[in-house]
Amino acid sequence: MLTGYLQHHWAGSTAGVAAFRRVGRNLPDTQAAAEIRDLAGEVAADREALRVMMRRVGTRPSVIGTTLARAGELLGRLKPNGSLVHRTPLTDVVELETLRLAVTGKRAGFEVLRAAADDDQRLDPFALDRLLARADEHLRTLERLHVTVSRDRLVGHPS
């Protein structure tokens, strides 16, 4: 069960890292984009921490799951924002919501792994505590950016 769980979260992290990098490149608000790029580096580091856990458990990422997650992230770019060709202000809102959901999922996974670490010596409870704390920081940052950017887009005052 643990192997499959780790592989599922690895697949999700694949899509998450790609989404953070894309939003960091494309968000028109330069200050928010810079913060997202910083988070992208930390999210990628969290993914590598997951890889270390997988090694300790004796498993590795599923090629099929990783490929499907990446394909899902690419398909997720097609969203009903009122324009299939051009980026709209609604795109910024939806993408930031997507990042918040991704970090919520990441945090939930680390929470379950932290609970399992009490009974499975292959999992490092201290590393998981750090990952949980960082996920909480990411959620606070994303909440602030999401609300600020969304308010600007919804009232017609683009940053």
Image (tube, rainbow, N blue to C red):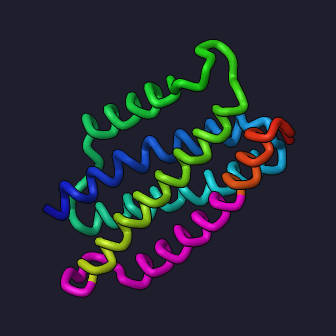
Q: Is residue 41 above or below residue 107?
A: above
Q: Within the image, what quadrant is residue 117 found in?
A: bottom left
Q: Within the image, what quadrant is residue 126 found in?
A: bottom left
Q: Is residue 33 left or right of residue 109?
A: right
User: Is-magenta flag for residue 40?
Assistant: no
Q: Position of residue 64 (x, y in %)?
A: 25, 34
Stretch of the chain drawn in magenta: 118-144
Work out which residue is located at the far top of the displayed protein and give it: 85
Identify the image quadrant of the N terminus: bottom left
**136 or 54, nearer to the observer:** 136
Q: Position of residue 57 (x, y in %)?
A: 23, 67
Residue drawn at x 33%, y 54% is: 9
Residue drawn at x 51%, y 26% is: 79
**88 or 70, nearer to the observer:** 88
Q: Position of residue 95 (x, y in %)?
A: 59, 40
* Magenta span: chief secondary structure: helix
Q: How many marks?
A: 0
Identify the image quadrant of the C terminus: top right
Q: Is residue 131 left or right of residue 54?
A: right
Q: Position of residue 31 (x, y in %)?
A: 83, 50
User: Is-magenta flag for residue 132?
Assistant: yes
Residue drawn at x 49%, y 58% is: 103
**155 or 46, nearer to the observer:** 155
Residue drawn at x 74%, y 40% is: 154
Q: Is residue 106 above or below residue 85?
A: below
Q: Is residue 69 left or right of residue 3?
A: right
Work out which residue is located at the far left of the displayed protein and give it: 1
**113 or 95, nearer to the observer:** 95
Q: Is residue 34 above or below residue 15?
A: below
